Amino acid sequence: MTKKQLDMIKELRSNVHAVAGGSVADVVMEGDAALDSGTDSAKLAEWVRGAIGRLDKEVPEKQRTAIMEACGRNCAKVNHRVVETFRKRRAKYDSLDDFLDAESRSPMNGTKLWRDGGAMMQAYVPRKFSHPMRCYCALVNKLPEGTTMSPTYCQCSRAFVQQMWDEALGRPVAVVLLRSALSGADECQFCISTRA
């Protein structure tokens, strides 16, 4: 396990503690103290899968979403280059439609953008990335094939996507997770709409 992955585990514990309290964090994060630099990525992914299962059992949905959104916002800060690259790509075009047209012709590796009626759609296609994986997240990208995970975890990605679009458009957006590769879909799909 890398230092980055260890920091992500600490962030998850901190967010569970902040939203649901220390005793709940201890239940959800059971076994995190045993994770160290010798923990391989597949074992780490299985541990995270178990932690999210415990989170689902211990914490109401609204609080679970808040926990994972906080993780996603932090991830956007840590991975600010990805967010900034997306913002710069959008800034090259006079209109959102021109941007979406250009992205549909030449998308970022492992990502698709398109319109579906009046909604903007984005998909992550981690299996078609330059080095295929289950998810772009370093904590679960080695989750074994055929193993699924609660979509609760993907509220982190939803918050990351929201941060990208908020910055790219310079105004708040709403993002809904429609499908998750970790939950069994071929890709992660998000619907993005500007807030009223």
Image (spheres, grey):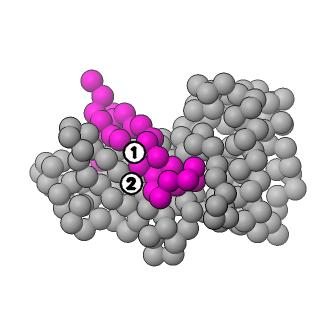
Quadrant of the snapshot with the N terminus: bottom right
- Mark 1 vs mark 2, CA separation in Å: 6 Å
Q: Which residue is drawn at 77% across and 63% down?
A: 43
Residue at figure coordinates x 38%, y 54% from the top left: 123
Q: Position of residue 181 (x, y in %)?
A: 52, 55
Locate residue 187, reporting x and y percent: 45, 56
Question: Residue at left 80%, top 66%?
Answer: 39
Q: Which residue is drawn at 83% across and 36% down?
A: 27
Q: Quadrant location of residue 45?
A: bottom right
Viewer-side residue, 120 vs 69: 120
- Placement of 194 over or under 7, stated as above or below: above
Q: In this view, does 137 lie to the left or right of 3?
A: left
Give 43 or 96, whichever is nearer the viewer: 43
Q: Which element is circle 2 on? A: strand
Describe the element under mark 1 as helix, strand or loop.
strand
Residue 190, which numbered label?
1
Q: In which quarter of the image is residue 68?
A: top right
Count of residue discs: 2
Residue 74: x and y, percent?
55, 45
The reply to whether the magenta stretch includes residue 152 is: no
- Which residues, given as a range, are shown in magenta? 168-196
Tell me residue 95's x, y (percent).
13, 48
Q: Tell me the kind of residue under disc 1.
A: Phe
Residue sticking out furthest to the bottom: 130
Q: Nearer the viewer, residue 80 or 113?
A: 113
Amino acid carrying label 2: it is Ala
Query: Quadrant where the C terminus lies?
Result: top left
Q: Tell me if I can see residue 17 in this picture.
A: no
Residue 193 located left or right of residue 58: left
Query: Pointers 1 and 2 in contact (CB under 8 A)?
Result: yes
Q: Which residue in the structure is indicated by mark 2?
A: 123
